[in-house]
Amino acid sequence: MNSSARNTRAKKGRSLWFWILAVLITLASAYYQRKTGPTYPISGEMKAGTTSVSYTFSRSHAGEGGAPVRVTIPDTMVTATLDWRRYPTDDAWKQIPMHRDGDQLSASLPHQPPAGKVEYYVRLQVGDRHDLVPPGRAAVLRFRGDVPAVLMSPHILLMFLAMLFSTRAGLAALTRNEKTGNYVAWTAGLTLVGGMILGPIVQFYAFGSFWTGAPLGWDLTDNKTLIAMVGWILAFIKTRNNRPARGWVLGASILMLIIFLIPHSVLGSQLDYAKFAGHE
């Protein structure tokens, strides 16, 4: 095997390993973002007296109707109420009796307008003993409109691919043996379509507004998408005419990773109940 063939084989092998590493980094960051986000369900197990209680509480509800709340309690002597109020307000707490169906006690939180939030917990009663689920702090749930899968699925897929190509571009920028231009173009294009075009459409279906980031507001999801887009536009400009611009590409890739690690929906759309009359 001549040296040219060996070099070609080595480049292909290195590229394969870079792609594998990019996939692993992207999957890990996506898992971290989802797991730490404010819409990820709260779940756990606890004891109410001698009774075992398991629960999974949603923190996001899409579409019409109330948001169901369930706890699993085999002991039929246990009764419960669902305590809730609008968030963030000083409203008095309201109680909804929970009904038993086999091992489960259930009730529904009243429907709220898109971006409306409620805080809630379940109050268990066993004899004279009262226990709160979840223990510690009340759960907070945000209501949103139902986003058609034909929009949501491409949005999620394209943003995942944007993160993948961003990571791959950053790895390419670390070596002088790979060109970065194609990776930069793909990342910029995917971020544009997935984040700047589909993102606002998804947000409109979910919360009734196309854009709540700068200069109109401080929605962190919109603003971090905008920052990522600016980073990749600059990288795209700097890599035109086959210029490597490795520092710009690496910087845009690191910026994208930092942005991607910020939990989704942090500082997201939130209804101001003080300005919204007539909904209880």
Image (tube, rainbow, N blue to C red):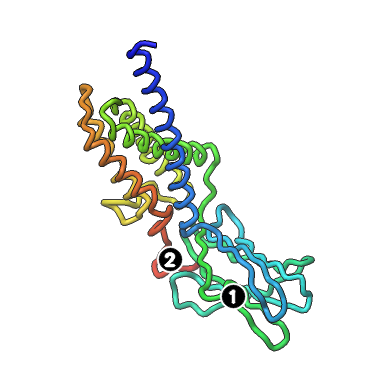
| SS of the residue under disc 1 | strand
At 52% from the left edge and 76% from the top edge, which residue is drawn? 136
Compared to residue 228, the image places residue 13 above or below, namely above
| SS of the residue under disc 2 | loop
Compared to residue 148, the image places residue 270 above or below, namely below
Seen from this angle, which residue lies furthest top? 2
Compared to residue 124, the image places residue 219 above or below, namely above
Is 126 situated left or right of 62 in this image? right
Give the residue type that dot 2 points to.
Answer: Phe
Is 178 situated left or right of 83 in this image? left
Q: Are marks 2 and 1 in contact (CB under 8 Å)?
A: no
At 28% from the left edge and 46% from the top edge, which residue is drawn? 227
Image coordinates for residue 36, horizontal then vertical, percent:
46, 57
At 66% from the left edge and 65% from the top edge, which residue is drawn? 70
Image coordinates for residue 238, horizontal then vertical, percent:
20, 31
Find disc 2 in the rendering and name its residue: 276
Image coordinates for residue 64, horizontal then vertical, percent:
59, 55
Is 23 situated left or right of 129 in this image? left
Image coordinates for residue 48, horizontal then vertical, percent:
67, 78
Find disc 1 in the rendering and name its residue: 83
Give the residue type that dot 1 points to.
Answer: Asp
> Who comes first in sequence, dot 2 or dot 1?
1
Seen from the viewer's position, the closer of residues 270 and 244 is 244
Q: Quadrant of residue 196?
A: top left
- Which class describes the residues within 10 Å of circle 1: few (<14), some (14-19), or many (20+)? some
Is 111 situated left or right of 180 in this image? right
